[in-house]
Amino acid sequence: MKALKYKFSILLLSMGLMMGSEACMDDLDTIPIDDEELVSDVVFGSDLGAYTSSLAKIYAGLAISGNSGGDGDADVAGVDGGSQASFLRGLWNLQQLPTDETHCCWGDAGIPDLNYITWGSGNVFIKGFYYRLYYQINLANAFLRETTDGKLSSRGVDEATKAEIVTYRAEARFHRALAYFYLLDMFRNVPFVTEESPVGSTPPDQKSAEYIFDYIESELIDCESDLLDPFVGYDSEKYGHANKAAAWALLSRLYLNAEIYTGVDRYTDCITYSNKVLDEGYILDPVYANVFKADNYTSTEMIFPIRYEGEETQTWGGMTFLLSAGEPSDMQAEVNAVGAWQGVRARSALLTTFEAEDNHTLDARFSMVRVDKTANYEIETPSLYTDNGIPVVKYYNVNSDGSLPASNIAYNDFPLFRLGEIYLNYAEAVLRGGTGGSTATALQLINELRERAYSDAGLSKISQSDLTLDFIFDERGREFFYEAQRRTDMIRFEKFTGSSYVWVWKGGTANGRSVSSHFSVYPIPADDIGANLNLTQNDGY
């Protein structure tokens, strides 16, 4: 990763980024450039190394926000790299803070609006994540433009290297599809650019949610055969790469939400692609907590992680944020985090989700909801740091055997896709009417998941009559709290906007209130609306 800024910034300068100054790298003059020279040939040449580095930059964009420690030399200009343009921190903020699970007491401009579901098109956290996604897309597009068979042949790349680059290209396409998935989920009708788009100042056209959905689907299916085969556990050469199972897991998630995105359900396809993952032999980690610890790269449950490696991936976003943002100050050493910022708390609704179970205190997942670390379960004063809501400590920068990694800088990988999600996707798709699965298998998968949590089949096992959509919604809350999935789940279950379900501070009032349905989609940032006359703002903004 350390060599990427030098190599890739020159390439991007030669090609031009599509999205305007807000999404441009701000240091594109690393070395002098000869106007008569084809810069891409200088960067790439015939050896594999530069292609590997350029692909690594795409992966790095999920983990870190810049090109030096602590988010310095930021990728995205105009916003703070660590807090506003971090992929993982941005994803987490937009998926967690507006929900019944999470509250942030910090007063940074834009945070209260996320807590209350009162944001507008100028919210800097929405803008930062939106431009991060387009930055990732631009990296992938640039890589794909420069790795066509014609360009590789013109540089004298041998056949063995070309074969490696075929896989690299598939991985870049996966990353681009992933970015478009989050744009679809959060913004719906968005600007669309690929490696075939005009290079330069031509503003991109806006495409409908249906178009973006079809594109994501076709890209993942088309690139699947060129991705690495799945494997279970750790492989030093393959771990962290997007493989076929990562594509299937993303398709499973895409199809589960298809009715929300396009109005057409695809639950049968969700079952099909969930089965593809299930058939690969992934195994639930026997200990739930180990999925989130510093050596979770060994987990047999991990399908696609965002990787962290201490000082090599130092950031104020990403896993540093997840380790430090919410734990009480007296737990900093136990968590082995760089800080104890005490800004994030669970709302009492998360406690209610667990208390729906008669034996919830025996659920290993509930042990991470630290009711013992607060004097008040409710968020009574939105800006109060302590004894105001419930601390959640889910991520530990500690190895599963209790030993410590090399430092207190994050070593935990973030499980962007893991087997537990596939279990729950399958079960929900069956209950919603998808074919190709069975209620018996759905029940078996859910009971396996719950037995892992309780370590006692007698306490955890549910019956067929218990397996309802309402149960699945609650079980997803118990399994995936603080994993950046809650907003999407709440929208799919029709519990996010409106008045059918309210929680404390929803809509900005202490007892909660109804909010307009237009908040199910985020606004396209005002900056981009102003800069691109092809764009139409989402309804309600």
Image (cartoon, rainbow, N blue to C red):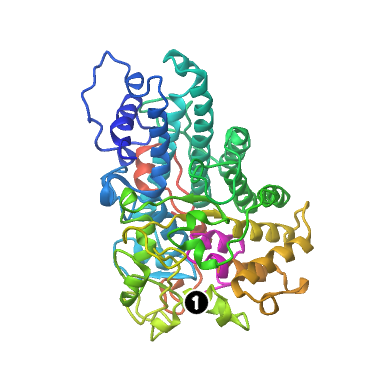
Residue 215: in magenta span: no
Question: Where residue 166 sits in the image (x, y, percent)?
Answer: 53, 28
Q: Quadrant of the N terminus?
A: top left
Question: Where residue 216 sits in the image (x, y, percent)?
Answer: 57, 40
Magenta span of residues: 478-503
Position of 433 compared to 3: left or right?
Answer: right
The residue shown at (73%, 65%) is 444
To which residue does mark 1 refer? 367
The residue shown at (29%, 61%) is 109
Spot the residue most to the bottom.
375
Q: Quadrant of the C terminus?
A: bottom left
- The answer, for residue 90, to whether it is visible in the render is yes
Q: Quadrant of residue 120?
A: bottom left
Question: Where residue 529 sits in the image (x, y, percent)?
Answer: 39, 43
Position of 458 compared to 176: left or right?
Answer: right
Q: In front here: 29 or 451?
A: 451
Q: Amino acid at mark 1?
A: Ser
The residue shown at (72%, 70%) is 467
Q: Quadrant of residue 135?
A: top left
Position of 314 compared to 260: left or right?
Answer: left
219 relative to 276, above or below: above
524 relative to 37, above or below: below
Spot the residue most to the left.
32
Callout 1: helix, strand or loop?
helix
Q: In front here: 118 or 398?
A: 398
Q: In front here: 135 or 318?
A: 318
Query: Magenta span: helix, strand or loop, mainly?
Result: loop
Residue 494: in magenta span: yes
- The answer, for residue 326, to whether it is visible in the render is no
Q: In front here: 295 or 15?
A: 295
